[in-house]
Image: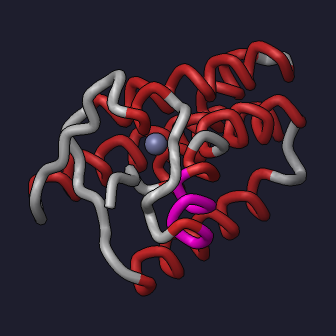
Amino acid sequence: MVLLYVSTHFATGAALGKIAGSNWLALILGLSSHILLDVLPHHDYRGRRGIILDSLVTLALMLWLLPNPSYILWGAIGGAFPDLEVIINRVFFRGGGRRFFPSHSGILPHPSRVWPEGFIIQASIMVAALVFLLATLRVTAG
Ligand SMILES: [Zn+2]
């Protein structure tokens, strides 16, 4: 399975969306971050449990971000959107279908690391994005 956690992409895209401050720039930054994160060595979960947990975390993040300015969610969507082709490919083509996004198609590397090193990389990125969002959204709300 070659899938950086969707929730990590989503959180990072949201943080970049916050920085962007506009919907289009947020979407572009989110999409760009997807490539950079896929190229970093990372852990890829396997099986349905990972998919379900990752989806729940992503859904919780989305619900948390919804009341905020739309560009934050657009950044998050841009960050996570490319993995939709991986999920569709897995569900409908059992992983044998064609992928188009550069870090999924083989044009760019998508290096994997075993547990726990790869997970620590993912968790570090996620924590950094969440800390940034918590800090900046608190400032915005005040
Ligand atoms: Zn990806």
Q: Is residue 134 visible?
A: no
Q: Residue at x 62, y 61 (%)?
A: 88
Which quarter shows the N terminus? bottom left
Q: What is the chief secondary structure element of the magenta stretch?
A: helix
Q: Where does the image place residue 5, in percent across and percent down from the top left?
A: 43, 56
Q: Say left or right for 132 vs 40.
A: right
Q: Is residue 76 magenta?
A: no
Q: Which residues are magenta?
A: 86-92
- Asked which quadrant contains residue 100, the reply is top right
Q: Say left or right for 107 vs 87.
A: left
Q: Residue at x 50, y 32 (%)?
A: 34
Q: Is residue 65 visible?
A: yes
Q: Say left or right for 135 vs 73.
A: left
Q: Residue at x 73, y 22 (%)?
A: 26
Q: Is residue 88 magenta?
A: yes
Q: Nearer the viewer, residue 101 or 130?
A: 101
